[in-house]
Image: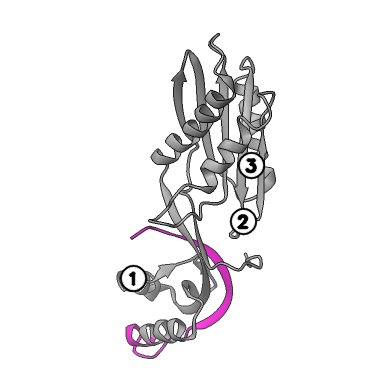
Amino acid sequence: MQVQDSRTTSYTTLAAGRDLRHELEIKRSRFITVLRRAGTEEDARELAAGLRREFHDARHHCSAFVIGPDRSIQRSSDDGEPAGTAGIPMLEALLKRETAPGVTDLSDVSAVVVRYFGGVLLGAGGLVRAYSESVSTALELAPLIRRSRLRICCTAVPHARAGRLENDLRAAGLVMAETSYQDRLTVLRIAVPDQADAIAAATERIQQLTAGSAALTPEGTEWVDERFA
């Protein structure tokens, strides 16, 4: 999938997989935080809708999300809490989460905090702290990954040689993208930094591993998940 226009070339998001859930009890109120990776505003809103159904007897289902490599989409909802005491503190917790020293680039994340009122009023300041802490604590437990805009390059080799070549490329530290299959050939796709020297180095590596019998063809760019070092 071709990437959207963006000023940035990488950002941090949640690792793909299940939603993360974490619960805090503050002055007898239960704060159940759910984090989900969300690539679109529709994905983000689906989290809140699903939790409304699951926790239908809860008093509040407050939410916040930030989406896009440049974090251009930012939304929040207090869902009946006093204005500014829930959604905005939750959004700020997402935006201010450090993913590396001095780096705040977390995106494509939707957060919902379900609150069961415990009978003790927290006051405006207490609510701000509770909702902020709920999201911040959940984020500390969340597995994060780096998402980078990479140039996709492909090479076609006979089926019998594809498995060995793919293993060699992985061993060389190259990031593999989706593989496809033709009648007689396997098309291996490699994701490299979108820079001429990186593409040249990958091309040279392919030629070394195949004794010059395979070529590398640059295609479009994609956002690719990468592990933190």
Q: Residue at x 56, y 25 (%)?
A: 127
Which quadrant is the C terminus positioned in?
Answer: bottom left
Please state which amino acid type lies under the numbered disc 2. Gly
Q: For marks 2 and 1, give the CA distance.
A: 27 Å
- Residue 58: x percent and y percent? 61, 17
Q: Is residue 91 above or below residue 52?
A: below
Q: Quadrant of residue 7?
A: bottom right
Is residue 184 visible to us here? no
For discs 1 and 3, the disc positioned in front in the rendered view: 3
- Residue 102: x percent and y percent? 42, 57
In this figure, which residue is indicated by the disc labeled 2?
A: 68
- Residue 124: x percent and y percent? 59, 24
Of 171 and 91, nearer the camera is 91
**Secondary structure beneath disc 1?**
loop
In this figure, which residue is indicated by the disc labeled 3?
A: 44
In this figure, which residue is indicated by the disc labeled 1?
A: 173
Which residues fall within the magenta stretch? 207-229
Of 158 and 63, nearer the camera is 63
